[in-house]
Image (tube, grey):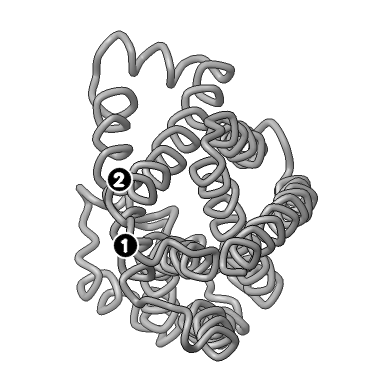
Amino acid sequence: MSEFYNIVIGKNSVPALAITVVLMFVMPALFLIYWMRRNRKKLNIKFLIWGAVGFIISARVLELGVHFVCLIMDNPVSRFINGNTIAYVLYGITMAGVFEECGRYIILKYVIKKDLTPENVVLYGIGHGGIEVFTVLLPSIILYLAIAVLFSSGDINNALKTLNITEETASAALPAVQSASLFGYGMMVMNVIERLFAMLLHVGFTVVVYYGIVTSKKKYLFIAIILHMLIDAFPALFQRGIVPLWSVELWGALWTVIVVVIAVKLYKKMKDSFVSEKV
């Protein structure tokens, strides 16, 4: 427990974390407000809801269930994956690509059929990306903020008691406390940019998958899966200590541009097709 008494919360940690929390709420809201103002009469809110539900089912229930068996439980498979960097990376990026993109495909093709327009498909992507912010990143940032506030007060014993950190839980809690202490404006900017990329990617992937559905070309589902895997490659390598953090951000920016360009082209094709059909 002595290591906690040596931790010093950076002077910028609390304000940087507080601003990050606010921006994490604001960003999905701005995406939604912009798209709804631009397409007021063409949108059905159920697509936003199904986008959120789709992410929760595919990524937070099914994918995490597989992770529990293949990564967390102690068995020959988990020991092999965790002990081999190549296997770990390939497993991680494959699971992320397959579960999320197949989840989009199944819901868009078999669950939501009415009002399946390009505008509503983008709304689905906003729901998918928005709920990821609230269920994956935001809880961690709020926890870091609570830690930073408690430890910056100077009463370490009270902080440990409030956070229920004991001798048994100290080793598991230490990384979170250290992360909170080191969080500054640089990390704030990186987190916000990463979420911006993620929102754009979720919309882009949804458009690519949907284009494959309306054109009856299943190859676009596989294209979305491969693109998703490529984007997740560097984050997975970073987790294993193979590449630095700055390369992850650069890699993400590059593939975000590529996916957005592809999605915009496909979206315009679908829009033109819808206009032609109405005429």
| Residue 14 % position (x, y) | 52, 84
| Residue 126 % position (x, y) | 49, 68
Upstream in the sequence, badge 1 or badge 2?
1
What amino acid is at disc 1?
A: Trp
| Residue 150 % position (x, y) | 36, 81
- Figure quadrant of residue 77: top left
Residue 270 placement, left or right of 5: right
Residue 110 marker: 2
Decide if residue 92 is in sight here. yes
Please name whichever residue, 93 or 171, is drawn nearer the observer in this view of the structure: 93
Residue 4 lies, with reference to residue 147, above or below; the image says above
Image quadrant holding the C terminus, namely: bottom right
Please name whichever residue, 17 or 157, is drawn nearer the observer in this view of the structure: 17
Give the total of numbered labels. 2
What amino acid is at disc 2?
A: Tyr
Q: Which of pointers 1 and 2 indicates the residue nearer the eye?
A: 2
| Residue 134 % position (x, y) | 38, 69
Residue 180 lies, with reference to residue 101, above or below; the image says below
Residue at the extreme top? 76
Residue 176 placement, left or right of 253: left
Residue 39 lies, with reference to residue 131, above or below; the image says below
Element type at mark 2: helix
Residue 120 placement, left or right of 109: right
Residue at 33% from the left image edge and 18% from the top image edge: 78
Element type at mark 1: helix
Please name whichever residue, 211 or 199, is drawn nearer the observer in this view of the structure: 211
Residue at 42% from the left image edge and 59% from the top image edge: 176
- Figure quadrant of residue 232: top right
Residue 10 marker: none
Residue at 76% from the left image edge and 46% from the top image edge: 251
Q: Which residue bears the numbered disc 1? A: 50
Residue 98 lies, with reference to residue 79, above or below; the image says below
